[in-house]
Amino acid sequence: MRAAAGVFAAALAARLAFWRLQGTLPLAGDALEYDAFARNLVEAGRYLGPSGEAASRMPGYPLFLAGLRVLFGAAPEAVIAAQCLLGALTCVILLDLARRFVPEKWAIACGAVAALYYDLIVPAAAPLSECLYSFFLVLSVWCLYHPSWKPLRRAAFFAALSACLYLVRPEPLPYIVTTIFLAPYLWEKFSRKEVLSALAVFTLIVGVWVGRNFSMLGRFMPASSVGKSVGYLSLYLPAAKMGLAGERHAPPAAMTELERDADFAAAYKALAATLTGAQIAKAYLYNLLSILYPFLPQYDWTYVFIVPFWLLGCAVAARRKELWPVAGAVLCSLTVFTFFGGYASRYRQGVSPFIVLLAVAGMKAAYDSAGEKRFKLFSSAWLGANVLIWLFQGQARSAALWLRAASWGH
């Protein structure tokens, strides 16, 4: 209890301090669209976007915003305050989840790292979906690994919370379904009954969204109405960076949201036809490397410090099947955003709790293999190197941009 309280206090203080230093961000881009859905839901009782879109955004985060608007009014400060609390609670849940994989002192380290990890602090102070996504991700897996619950209860809660996770953002669907089907292999007490029950719970909750979309748009739409447009942009933007694409496609303004998405599908095919397979692969590699990029544009030394341990933790996960759902969530998110997201390092923020958890598993493996003295020596030297890079981050970023230009031609 003392460890959890300490992690919560440190995490909350870090998020509130960052918010105070940064200030409340104005609504723009994705945040503006989320707010429009929430505002229309509260004021007009209809889930519609700023231009009347019915399904261009998944409903999870706008519903969260709408609930806060009902309780506290339209003040953006209420959203950030709630997210700071939610982010701190996520760190505490992650601490308890880590106990299923590593000894107590390493679990406490996991909670402490999460409390001060930049990629988990920043989302709390931004009116975007990453903070809520991280909360549902960690809570759902915490339920799946609950040691005192019966398998059916664990499966049902995982499915219900994973449905909430999916309704915030759709990219975890492959990971969720795979985890449900793998459950009997991961845990002996899980059987076909738990698998079918989890699938039923997940389908029932998500089915409300799917049914609503069908009634409004007349089409089976399990996710959002912008999948094909996001797919087009995820290829066009890196291709344009490399000088391989011309003017960005813009559908006629009179099109409906479904017509726009279909138009983007045709634009994607036309763009792909002008590129070689190697150029397409290079464009998507650009997306992946950008998601893993350490400058935001400031140098994130907390992220780079845990990268080697995270990679080692992935190797540990390959040998320990109980870690597969944790590693699978990260792998799924990085893969989906590479092809349906584009080049933005914030795309790794949603799964940052599990990046931290895998890194701590890697730290323990390194400690056990190298011994305490060598582990501390490497960790201290690596931390010092990252602090040094942070102090000279202007020069380091210039070097990174030069390397990018040499590799991608811009």
Image: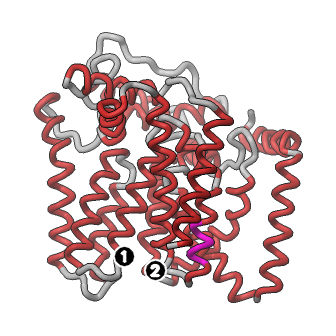
**Residue 91 location, x and y as percent?**
52, 61
Question: Magenta span has 218?
Answer: no
Residue drawn at x 42%, y 50% is 133
Magenta range: 106-111
Residue drawn at x 78%, y 80% is 375
Question: Magenta span has 109?
Answer: yes
Tag on residue 202?
Answer: none
Viewer can see residue 282 = no
**Dividing the picture into quarters, in which one does residue 346 lie?**
top right
Residue ID for mark 1? 145
Residue drawn at x 61%, y 38% is 19
**Image quarter hosting the C terminus:** top right
317 over 236 or under it: above or below: below
**Contact (Cβ within 8 Å) of mark 2 with mark 1:** yes
Assign the magenta stretch its main secondary structure. helix
357 over 290 or under it: above or below: below
Task: Tell me the crowding category of disc 1: few under 14, some 14 to 19, or many 20 or more residues within 10 angstroms, Cα based.
Answer: some
Tag on residue 100?
Answer: 2
Q: What's the CA distance linking mark 2 and mark 1?
A: 7 Å
